[in-house]
Amino acid sequence: MDKSSTLLVHYDKGTPAVAKEIKEALEGNDVEAKVDAMKKAVMLLLNGETIPQLFITIIRYVLPSEDHTIQKLLLLYLELIEKTDSKGKVLPEMILICQNLRNNLQHPNEYIRGVTLRFLCQLKETEIVEPLTPSVLQNLDHRHPFVRRNAILAIMSIYKLPNGDQLFVDAPEMIEKVLSTEQDPSAKRNAFLMLFTCAEERAVNYLLSNVDKVSDWNELLQMVVLELIRSVCKTKPTEKGKYIKIIISLLSATSSAVIYECAGTLVSLSSAPTAIRAAANTYCQLLLSQSDNNVKLILLDRLSELKSLHKDIMVELIIDVLRALSSPNLDIRRKTLDISLDLITHHNINEVVQMLKKEVVKTQSGELEKNGEYRQMLIQAIHACAVKFPEVASTVVHLLMDFLGDSNVASALDVISFVREIIETNPKLRVSIITRLLDTFYQIRAGKVCPCALWIIGEYCLSLSEVESGITTIKQCLGELPFYSVSEESEPTETSKKIQPTSSAMVSSRKPVILADGTYATQSAASETTFSSPTVVQGSLASGNLRALLLTGDFFLGAVVACTLTKLVLRLEEVQSSKTEVNKTVTEALLIMVSMLQLGQSPASPHPIDNDSFERIALCIKLLCHRNDEMKKIWLESCRQSFVKMISEKQLREMAELKAKTQTTNAQPDDLIDFFHLKSRKGMSQLELEDQVQDDLKRATGEFTKDENDANKLNRILQLTGFSDPVYAEAYVTVHHYDIALEVTVINRTKETLQNMCLELATMGDLKLVERPQNYSLAPETSMQIKANIKVSSTETGVIFGNIVYETSNVMERNVVVLNDIHIDIMDYISPAVCTEVAFRTMWAEFEWENKVAVNTTIQNEREFLDHIIKSTNMKCLTPPSAIEGECGFLAANLYAKSVFGEDALVNVSIEKQTDGALSGYIRIRSKTQGIALSLGDKITLKQKGSS
């Protein structure tokens, strides 16, 4: 059976020492060699060696030494050796140690006295300690505080032994006297700790008689006071009012540790608004005053907990929380923004947005390397604010539009998404946004941002001047036509050399991408976004941003340009009375489209135009040549209606999620009702009154009675052995994120006592047993519970297997009962999560592990199969319901979940209904680690048939 260790020593792995070498070194006169030998002896003891042959050598040669280091090592050695025999009686040779310890306790040197007293704290044998008690008591009056503080700790440890109260009958009384006269802070703290541990009533009386002085005490003593208050309030909750006053007074202490503990104690003891406000203010002050990033993150966690429980109070402190954005650390900034966004109301929205705008402007300085990433976080935060409170959009949209040409693509993409949503939800801002967009369009350098900006121009340019400006802007950004001249075709080598420099930082790529509905498509796109200043291509003037992107082979953008021009021309036809002007514009648009097709099919292009883009541009040409009212309606109205529907659905989803979060437990009809106005206020402060009212409210709303569901507990019990086995065992498995707790109930069904019974467990996967198995004895027809803890290090399906081994009195050989395997389910580690479509696509492209599972199911309805997969995998469907409704024989959806270890799990379901009614297709799982992809794949394969 393992023993508990009181030592933790750093040890460099090397060749273990031999007992013979240690003995020779100890017998010599060299002090350094003795020190080294004693260290080796201590390390051998810590590693489980007994080395009994060294004991007499150490008594003869080490005990008489006057060297302080040797004496300290001797005490460590004595701490580790066995002092009792197998029956628990103290070994006779320990009498030799007692005399030495008594001499040390009366030694003229205070260090020897102090370390010996510290050693006595670790002794559990009353027979050894008993003769030393008079010497320990004498040290309470020693002149040196080091000796006094260790003497108090020694008395406390001896008093806590099984018969310790008989060795020191009046110990609490003595320590109370010491406490009133002691001046040393550490000794005073130890004395108060002794009273708190051994005589709580005396500690409470001392505290209450010195309430006025508590704020002047040393921080060590103040920390013990807080510990005492927590302990007393748990046992006597009715008296917590007077203790809360003490905590409030300690909030003005100079020590940050004390202030932090005070705030935590306040929150745990009281729900009164005054107390919560004081705690939140304290956390905010510490957030600004502490420089350590880890401390800041811990404080933000505390504030986040307060936000979930006391949101109305935290709303008042939102500006204080936002001051944490001054930290350069991105994790702190991200956490700060997450907390703040949940605290925004009509009253503080303007202040919050003003502060965020200032932070955005600061990111332009370029002093910090991660400014782009921080700017993206701020833009997303402002976007969220503007969606919640549309009235602030007008104050931020123009500032953010300055960042459309940002070198950080993600940041620019967030800005254009924000502009697209705001222009639809705020019709009053349409004119100013369109004007600003047309003015700044030439600055956009990202191939992913341009299509969205062009879509906005095509949809929201409504007046004659706006339509004409839109067409003019696109023409200017495309440059002069054609995109290459005929003479260049004969010299393809030269052309490629000439075209190459137009965008030196851009590399064309052709890769499959996942569309919004989850299906694959081939997209030609520029993989980078910044490029050098436009250069002159033969037969053209200085090229604009659209031209530069087209010349790198981004024909998807070409198709978007064609669609935008088509929409603008159709709208021009409605608002322009002059047919001549309309025909002229149609001709120019057709020339641009034909030129793009020509470029895509020429050898001058880095790669040929893809079929999707070719067909899209050809459709636009066909439409402009044969215009009719039906097509006009589809192009000018239907597209925008789809976007409006998407926005409204998004808002409805967010509202539903918000409602689900704010649902609270309701009281039962027969619960006790406490009337606040009838409560006695006699002798109660405002804080105590508030606290009692809050407790009554909690009791009334059922917050105090949140018990675990017993039915769920029964579902997690696993049978480990058969009913006919001599030993019956069953396990209750509890998963706590990084730990698995097994509570195994073992029943002896025989008429004999089971001796040396041991539960032996082994694991497979990323699971690790924490404790070694212990031996037990189990009486006939009785049961016992054995607990085992297992550490989990990753999201993988693990297996725990093992057996129960025991002996009986009749048979000398050991009996073995093999246990059923316990499978640890991946579902215990992953939970549904939400991410944006852009984030999903980015992760899908980055993650290297993919598991492709073929659909094999008896379910014949596509939507029913998707619901079954969502339920089986505990994931969230990111594809909106409107995108997968209706009957068309196809279904594609994206699912997302996050593990407790912070891993992302992405799933794409693509299925098709065959003519015979069966479903076919694939479920693709992607993740950063192999474990989660394989485990999820196994789970889906197991569950997809349609069974439970």
Image (tube, grey):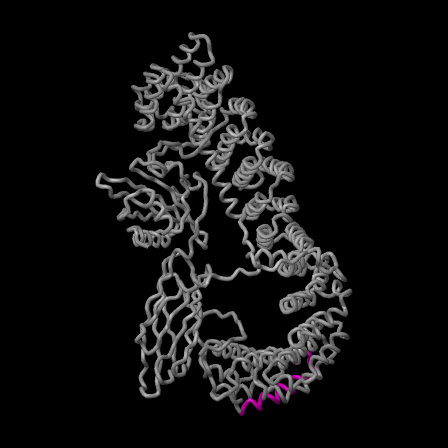
Depth check, front residue: 355 or 732: 732
Question: What residue is at 65 percent from the left and 56 percent from the top?
Answer: 694
Q: Position of residue 493 (x, y in %)?
A: 32, 24
**Residue lying at 38% horizontally and 12% vertically, measured from the top left:** 587
Examine the rendered structure and indicate whether residue 205 appears above or below residue 825.
below
What is the quadrant of residue 214 in the picture?
A: bottom right
Residue 944's place in the image compared with 361, above or below, is: below
The answer to whether residue 256 is seen in the rendering is no
Using the rendered view, name the quadrant where residue 126 is placed: bottom right
Q: Residue furthest bottom?
A: 92
* Residue 826 among those drawn in magenta: no
- Give the prevailing secondary structure in the magenta stretch: helix
The relative height of residue 647 versus residue 736 in the rendered view (above or below) is above
Q: Position of residue 97 (x, y in %)?
A: 58, 88
- Rendered location of residue 684, percent (x, y): 74, 60
Camera-nearest residue between 139 and 743: 743
The residue lying at 27 percent from left, 40 percent from top is 913
Residue extending farthest to the left is 916
Q: Quadrant of residue 777?
A: bottom left
- Quadrant of image for the N terminus: bottom left
Q: Which residues are magenta?
A: 92-112
